[in-house]
Amino acid sequence: DTTKYGYDNKEKFIECFYSVKLKDFNYPTFERWHDETNSTHLATRTKNDIYKLLKTILNYATAWHEFSFAKVYPKMYNFNDPNEFPKEQLFFTYEEFKQFLSVETDIKWIGIFEILYYCGLRKGELKGLTWKDIYFDKKVLSVNKQITQRNNRVKFEFSDTKTKDSRRIVPITKVLLNDLKMLYEQDKKEYYGFNDDFFVVSDAKPIADSNIYLRRTKLATLAGLKVIRIHD
C-alpha cells in the first residue's frame, strides 16, 4: 500500500507521456521530459525515483508486449546534481535521547518516542500498533501491520508491513515495559469502551502524522537538540 501511494504521487510527473505512443518513444521525447523534470524543485533522489517508475513501465512494455527500446535505453540517464548535498542520516545518542524525553511529561508521548527509539519501528508500524500486539508477560511486541499515509483518523484500514521480513517480534526494554504498563492503565480509565484493539499510541483511531512531527520538533527545540527525522 505504501508503494502504491508513492506511485500515485509520482504519476503526475509522467503524464506528459500519455499522448505518446510506445512505438514513437524516442530520445528527444525522453530528453524533453528529463529537462522539464530537472527544472522542478524536487530533490535529486525523488527525480530518480520518478525516472525509475518510467523505466519500470517501459520494461513492462518490453516483457509483456514485445516493444523494443534498444535505440533509446543506452542514451537515457539518471538525474545528477553535483551541488546538492546528500541528506545525512542523523541520530540521538542515548544521552541525547534522555535529554529529549526530559522535557516531556505526557506518558503517551513518552511511550511513542520510546517505542521508536528502543524498538526501531517505522512510523507506519508505530501507528498500527494495538494493545493486542503487546505481550507484557513475554516482554515483547509484535509488528504485523501498519497504518500508511493513505489513512487518516476519519477513514483508515490496516495494511501489511513493508516487506514480509518486516513482520517480526521485538523485545521490550525494562524502561519501556514499565511505561507501557502505566499507559495501558491510564487508557483503560480514560477511554470509554477501551479494549485491546485500541491503538497503543492513540485511542480508537490512529494518530495523525502531523502530530508526531510537531511534537518531535517541539521537544527537540525545548531540549536544545537538533531536529532529526522520525525514520532516523
Image: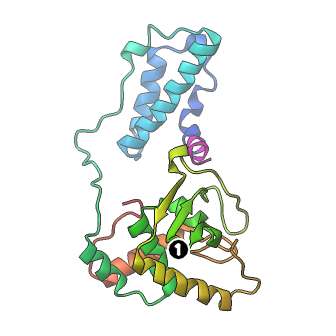
Looking at this view, name the residue that lies furthest to the front: 137
Q: Which of the image's four quarters has the C terminus?
A: bottom left
Number of dots carrying numbers: 1
Would you say residue 57 sits in the magenta stretch? no
Image position, residue 91 (x, y; %)? 29, 64
Can you say whether 6 is above or below 38 in the image? below
Specify whether residue 139 is in view: yes
Dominant SS of magenta comes to helix
- Which residue is depicted at the point 59% across and 20% down? 60
- Which amino acid type is marked by label 1? Asn
Q: Which residues are magenta?
A: 1-8
Compared to residue 39, the image places residue 210 above or below, namely below
Q: Nearer the viewer, residue 131 or 83?
A: 131
- Residue 226: image quadrant is bottom left
Q: Is residue 151 above or below residue 78?
A: below
Look at the picture and state if 157 lies above or below 189.
above
Q: Which residue is mark 1?
A: 211
Between 81 and 6, the one lying in front of the other is 6
- Rendered location of residue 160, percent (x, y): 62, 50
Q: Is residue 163 visible?
A: no
Q: Residue at x 59, y 56 (%)?
A: 144
Depth order, front residue of 136/89: 136
Residue 37, percent from left and from top: 44, 36
